[in-house]
Image (spheres, helix red, strand yellow):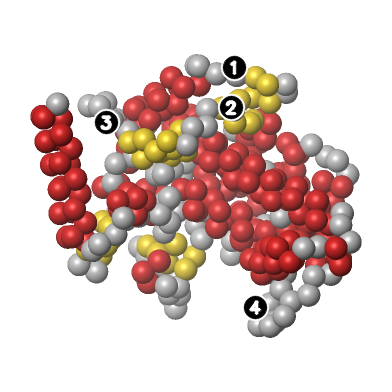
Amino acid sequence: MQRKQSNISLFIIAILLFSSSVGFVSFGQLLRAPIKKNNSFVTHKHVPIFFEHYGKIKKLQNSSVSETADITGYFESQTSKINLRRGNAQLVAPIFIWRLPVDLIGIEKVNYRKKNFITLLLPLLIRHNIAITQKRSYLKVLIEKPILSLSIEEQNWLIKIALHYKVFDKSIRKPIITKEILKELLNRIDIIPVSLALAQSSLETGWGTSRFSIDGNALFGQWTWKKNKGIRPKKRAQGTKHSVRRFNRLADAIQDYTHNLNSSSHYRSFRSKRGALRKADHPTDIWAQNLVEELKNYSSNSEHYISTIKAIIRENQLTAYDNYSLSP
């Protein structure tokens, strides 16, 4: 018992010493973010793989095999414990990793690398769509109410969400909720097909092997012009000063990506077509191929980008994953 207490004390002292060397931050922050030291970042690949499973934060216990083998092995062990089907939905274990395995790039068999990449990202993408759906459901409840009957709390929530989704300009001092605002909000708060997100992330990261995805959890190639927020491309067009934005966790990259599609004026036609597909009651597994056409502003070479995304979805049968759900 004394030996156990001694080990715990040594562990706490080690954390405190480590914290003092990088600044007084919480242990959780140290795990979630790259460590800044001497004005440069120690990349995510130097931080162990942490993940969430049924609300608990766990650390991958690396073996001598590989990070990829260890984490995918954990996925397989948990998946084998669940009933794989619920109605028409294929179920996946609710395991949410914070970063990709460093040695994913070392997998020579491309199809096996693709399978691992999809396995690791799928729960994260589904969870984010569930969160969007819940927010959308609450919005629909409020829309059914007369505007004058909305409580102060409900009005404040709507104004906050409208600002977040850029329905209101931030310069407006006293935004007013109208039926038109609520209709536009409903158009913006909606899911991104899992198949489309998988295709875009696979193209942007080389199925999880790019420097940006390994060093900065960058899954969708979002740009930033803030030096401390991104990773500078080794080959950058003359006259450009952008970097690829880094994220603390993979979930943060997904959230930023979906928010961009759901709020930016560049993707107004994307949202309009999605709304039309939903109104016509088309199943979500046919949304992606239709919505790809509205991503002209996602790449400077839009024609090539759109055709490539379509091919990735088709050749890898990604629309099958639009019918997947998380195991309870």
Q: Which mark is residue 83?
A: 1
The amino acid on which the numbered mark 2 sits, given as a three-letter code, is Ser
Distance between mark 2 and mark 3 Cα atoms: 26 Å
Location of the N terminus by quadrant is top left
* Marks 1 and 2 in Cβ contact (< 8 Å): yes
Q: Position of residue 304 (x, y in %)?
A: 62, 54
Q: From the image, tell me which residue sits under label 3.
A: 62
Instruction: Report the disc number at residue 170.
Output: 4
Q: Position of residue 305 (x, y in %)?
A: 61, 54
- At horizontal 75% and vertical 43% (from top left) the residue drawn is 287
**For mark 2, what is the residue?**
327
Q: Nearer the viewer, mark 2 or mark 3?
A: 2
Question: In the figure, is residue 204 to the left or right of 12?
Answer: right
Kind of residue sitting beneath label 1? Asn
Task: Find numbered disc 3 in the image and state the secondary structure of the residue it sits on.
Answer: loop
Contact (CB < 8 A) between labels 1 and 4? Answer: no
